[in-house]
Amino acid sequence: MEAMDYFLQQLSLVSVLGAVVFLLIGYHFLLFMFSSQKHRQGPPGPKPFPIVGNLLQLDVKRLDHALLKVRNILELLHLRQELSSNLKGTSHLFPVENHGLGLGGADSHPGRFTLCRSWQEGASRTTSSAKSRDEIRCSPNQTPPVLGSEAFDMTQLINYAVSNTTCSMVYGSRFDYNDKEFQTIVTRTTQGLYLLGSPAIQLYNLFPKIGKLLFFARKKLRDIFAANKRHHLMLLNRLKKTLNPDMCRGVADAFLVRQQQHEEAGITNSHYHNDNLLVTVMNLFSAGTETTATTLRWALMFMAKYPKIQDDVRQELKRVIGDRQVQVEDRQNLPLTDAVIHETQRFANIVPLAIFHKTSENIVFKNYLIEKGTTIIPVLTSVLHDESEWERPSTFYPNHFLNKDGKFRKRDAFLPFSAGRRMCPGESLARMELFIFFITLLQHFRFSPAPGVTEEELDLTPRIGGTLSPQLHKLCAIPIK
């Protein structure tokens, strides 16, 4: 007994901690070995390590590429129908259960229905396409860059224009570009979405227990979210004070009128409530504005890099539209222009991973068991850059969307908005905005690289963030007389 006491006294703290770590590793290794048989029921994939799983095999900077390297046999094109009715949204960042369409929020059928109804009642009355045209015409008059031979960074201009279009459709009015309040919320939203794609936040979403140690990034993101929330609450409260059921100014008014009707009717379980409105509006501004603006920046960069394609698009616009304003109905008569926009979305692939989901029940797919609660990560890169689906997947090639007669053709593998019932609810708005903005810009300007920069020197390597955006660059916007 005395010998044992002497031995224990000689043990250092480091020795004790080392022994504990060794025992934990041994325990998890045995647990891993005995439970491996259970996991063989699922689709095949790389064997994970004890404790850390597949963490060491993932590059969180380009998670889509990392997941493609370790992917199993399941294919998104074939899997989407089987799983679309058995998935629930999941996120560790903003748990907004049943509150609209939060970033990675919960199962959102109520939120989607609410948004669609409000959009039909609000956006259609506010003539959203006309607002996009008006905004792009206002842009050059409210910004300092010199249009002509002098090159400038178009990021801020495009962000302001797209965000203001959303303001017009949601709130019924636009901001002046010099408005400090407007500048702050646009900048803050951009910073938040860039942080959302940072390695720290990606790691937190994949491994929340480990990611909790990265408290600084989470705190910064939550602070941005809270500040934007306060700002939109203030704008919504202003609308409530001047609400007139007979005069719908935008989507928010349509929502508030329907909410008022449900309250007067005594409906207590309505999805038209303040929390739903707030989160839905914030999503339109954050996800909607950033994705549309980023896609437009890519489109203009592609036009500068490929001047022959830009000339062909402009000739089609001149032949079909001339000098008049573009209408949404013109799309069917502009196959090349439509193909260029689609190819921009495919090639740029700005959101390579769709929102994470979990299976709501056990699923058997191709004789493999996908257990209830399994996280499903739709890797859109796997279809948008699939060599078996596209003739030139690694090249900007608008002919992907043109048939042999030069007519536009749809492609099953074109899934930039994800797929199924939980695909992006703002798809129709994004498609309309991209179409109107892109054509209006090309009607009035020719885009080229900065002086001294060749087309070949324009770098197509994406900048990693909440979206895959172009590297910081400058272009010339030369007015067309």
Image (spheres, rainbow, N blue to C red):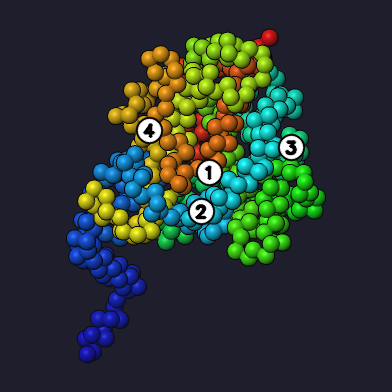
- Kindly indicate whether the residue at mark 2 contacts the one at mark 1 (C-beta within 8 angstroms): yes
Give how far across and how far down residue 141 sits, in percent.
75, 24
The type of residue carrying mark 1 is Pro
Residue ID at (67%, 59%) = 262
Front in this rendered view, residue 388 or 304: 388
Q: Tag 2's secondary structure?
A: loop
Residue ID at (53%, 60%) = 97
Residue 43 shown left or right of residue 450 in the figure: left
Which mark is nearer the camera, 1 or 3?
1
User: In the rendering, which numbered label is found on residue 425?
Assistant: 1
Q: Is residue 350 above or below residue 376?
A: above
What residue did someone put label 3 on? 174
What residue did someone put label 4 on? 413
Whichever of callouts 1 and 3 sits on the residue coming sooner in the sequence is 3
Whichever of callouts 2 and 3 sits on the residue coming sooner in the sequence is 2
Q: Tag 4's secondary structure?
A: loop
Give how far across and how far down residue 312 sits, in percent.
51, 12
Crowdedness near tag 2: few (<14), some (14–19) or many (≥20) residues, C-alpha within 10 Å: many
Whichever of callouts 1 and 2 sits on the residue coming sooner in the sequence is 2
- Kindly indicate whether the residue at mark 3 contacts the one at mark 1 (C-beta within 8 angstroms): no
Residue 70 shown left or right of residue 437 in the figure: left
What residue did someone put label 2 on? 108
Crowdedness near tag 1: few (<14), some (14–19) or many (≥20) residues, C-alpha within 10 Å: some
The type of residue carrying mark 4 is Ala
Crowdedness near tag 3: few (<14), some (14–19) or many (≥20) residues, C-alpha within 10 Å: some
Name the image quarter holding residue 383: top left
* Residue at the extreme bottom of the image, as rendered: 1
The type of residue carrying mark 3 is Arg
Q: How many marks?
A: 4
The type of residue carrying mark 2 is Ser
Per the model, the C-alpha gap separating discs 2 and 3 is 29 Å
Give how far across and how far down residue 429 sits, in percent.
58, 36
